[in-house]
Amino acid sequence: MDSPTRKTLQTTFRHALEYLEELDRAPAAATASLAVLRRQLLKPLQDQGVPPAQVIDELVAGVEGGLHASSGGRFFGWVIGGCVPAALAADWLASTWDQNAALYACAPAAAVCEEVVGVWLKDLIGLPAGASFALVGGCQMAHATCLAAARHSVLADRNWDVEEKGLSGAPAVRILTGGHRHGSIERAARLLGLGRGSVEELKIDQQGRLLESALQEALLKDRSRPAIVILQAGDINIGAYDDFETLIPIAKEAGAWVHVDGAFGLWAAVSPSLKHLLKGADSADSWATDGHKWLNVPFDCGFAFVADSEAHRASMSHRASYLTHDDDARDQIDWNPDWSRRARGFPTYAALRQLGRSGVADLVDRCCRHARALVRGMGALPGAEVVWEPQINQGLVRFLNPAPESTEADHDQHTDAVIEAIARTREAFFTGTTWRGRRAMRVSVCGWQTSEADVERSVAAARQAIEKVRSGQ
Ligand SMILES: *Cc1c(COP(=O)(O)O)cnc(C)c1O
């Protein structure tokens, strides 16, 4: 190998190990400001190139202070997983091998790897063995993929060929879902030309579950229009699960397509103590989930599954004379919205091999246990209040302003101030949300690295932050 390549990769390997070995001592989240990062990274695009090893050294220097330690043990912001070692390593190889995983002919081993991964995933999360699947960039694109199949199917039922004719003149599709849905649903509806206006928000109950009566009523109201019902398996605030066993038959009875958003929540199916939450979910028509959240595969990695594989293929597949299609093998282009793409199967394959069935179950259970310990521990601090005790790995805590006659608005402000003060300790990182009209701190545990010691350090950081905010520091 020519020496610049070797030198560059060795330099990179050293930087990677240093980063990972420092992760536990590093600040939990980025510390550099936008201005600082711009100063560090914004270099003129010079005329002459730079030797590759130097590029890497300077890139590492350029991102200093601008990386979240989100693959570490004390990053609880949004819903962000870490990456298990085998998946990280396989991800390096995916770049090294640089396969174009568009077709079997273009990347044979990558195509077969995805085939294997699809079979494993369906088995692991309890989806029908006959379902088709696609490895996409994330749950957002998994929604877009599944809903393209849904759009095909509900319009084909009304003798409308949407792939040929598009949507103008087509029967207007309705999307029925609860107020707990993720914003990626609206974006998928927009991308598919269904429009935000097609989304009808239905009532949810105190546990965050779509009301049976609300669904029934909505389906009855406008029977002539094709409908897609979107159910939630784990919402981002409280990890709420819709009652699949009750709702799916109602939707099916009305001829609707049922899609499940299980970005992280679908993984509860792997845990013997949690899988009851997904009872009946396997009778839906499509499911979207992520690899980069709870499975701890590096970004970007999401999975789409469709029970009616013909609807899925009809919505995506493409034939062209210059492509080499294979009758026997699985061509990803028949199932994916992308054309050229990264060989996403390799890191997922590696994560599943490293963890095994019981390893994934243990990862899920451990995250839930840590989420509960965090919420209870922080909820017991002076002035803190448990808003939602985790049923899975998501909970909510609120921090009350101790001043007499404080209003809810004061508590809202106080909560945000404590969230910020925790980040300033650099020990742990959380993000906020507005839930039922009030501010709260989200506790979201998705990473394999989080330990009991991390939970203790994070609760201690919250205690320190509360004291600082109270004393006006
Ligand atoms: C994260 C998330 C999404 C979007 O997934 P991406 O992987 O970010 O595209 C959708 N729904 C839920 C419930 C999520 O948590």
Image (spheres, grey):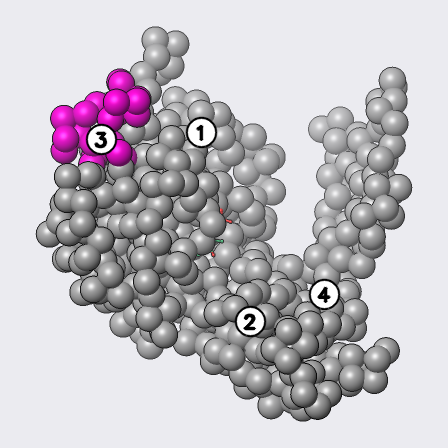
Residue 171, label in figure: 3
| Mark 3 burial class by Cα count in 10 Å: few <14, some 14-19, many 20+ | some
Is residue 227 toward the left or the right of residue 125 in the image? Answer: left
Q: Amino acid at mark 4?
A: Ala
Relative to 350, does residue 241 appear above or below in the rendering? Answer: below
Query: How far apart are the two marked residues, 3 and 2, measured between alpha carbons?
Result: 39 Å
Tell me which numbered mark, 1 or 4, is placed earlier along the sequence: 4
Tell me which numbered mark, 1 or 2, is placed earlier along the sequence: 1
Task: Indicate which label's residue lies in the foreground, 4 or 3.
Answer: 3
Task: Indicate which label's residue lies in the foreground, 1 or 2.
Answer: 2
- Residue identifier under label 2: 438
Examine the rendering and report whether any part of residue 147 can be seen.
yes
Query: How far apart are the two marked residues, 2 and 4, measured between alpha carbons?
Result: 26 Å
Query: How far apart are the two marked residues, 3 and 1, measured between alpha carbons?
Result: 27 Å
- Residue identifier under label 4: 28
Q: Based on the displayed image, in which of its 4 quarters is residue 132 positioned?
A: top left
Front-lying residue, 216 or 31: 216
| Residue 337 in picture, x, y percent from top left | 40, 30
Front-lying residue, 302 or 38: 38
Q: Is mark 1 within 8 Å of ligand 1?
A: no
Contact (Cβ within 8 Å) of mark 3 with mark 2:
no
- Residue shown at 84% from the left, 41% from the top: 38
Magenta span of residues: 151-172
Task: Indicate which label's residue lies in the foreground, 3 or 1.
Answer: 3
- Residue identifier under label 1: 338
Tell me which numbered mark, 4 or 3, is placed earlier along the sequence: 4
Is residue 413 toward the left or the right of residue 385 in the image? Answer: right
SS assignment at label 1 = loop
Query: How far apart are the two marked residues, 1 and 4, measured between alpha carbons?
Result: 34 Å
Front-lying residue, 473 or 103: 473
Q: Is mark 2 within 8 Å of ligand 1?
A: no
